[in-house]
Image (cartoon, helix red, strand yellow):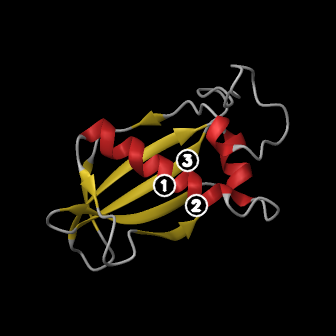
Amino acid sequence: HGFVVKTFIEPDGKKLFVNICHHDDTMQRPLDARGQDVAGLSTHFDDLRIPVLISKLRTCVDGSQVKSSAVDIVVNSWCIEMCNRKDFPDFKPRFVVTALGWIAEEHSIKLQAQGRMPWKIIKSK
């Protein structure tokens, strides 16, 4: 299942909810460093090329009715499976940091990187 990450947009500290979801019919599996479909499991995160769809930023409200922003990221189910595997504990945090970088670049925004915890998984679907 996918999950939601909460982070903050600089400089105002506005909350950003990142819905990380998956779909096999629209997204191909990641490719390895040779451009080949990943076969089974890969422990070399840096060698992966992960196809991704990133939505537009949209306005929403958090649980306290505070105006916030949200964005969706869609990847192949393989990525979510790897995020949920207990035998690859480094995959999920590395994936989240990478996904946040994609969002910052796609939408020309700066996400919080220091001070308060820069991101937190708040919900697993």
Who comes first in sequence, dot 1 or dot 3?
3
- Quadrant hosting residue 79: top right
Asked if residue 59 lies left or right of residue 40, the reply is left
Residue 50 spot, x, y in % from top left: 59, 33
* Residue 65 against residue 27 in the figure, above or below: below
**Marks 1 & 2, CB-CB < 8 Å contact:** yes
Farthest residue, direction left: 12
The one nearer the camera, 25 or 34, is 34
Residue 81 spot, x, y in % from top left: 73, 50
The three-letter code of the residue at mark 2 reads: Pro
Residue 27 badge: none
The three-letter code of the residue at mark 3 reads: Cys
Task: Tell me the residue that label 1 is attached to.
Answer: 97
| x 55%, y 47%: residue | 21
Mark pair 3, 2: CA separation: 16 Å
Quarter the C terminus occupies:
bottom right
Task: Tell me the residue that label 2 is attached to.
Answer: 93
| x 67%, y 32%: residue | 24
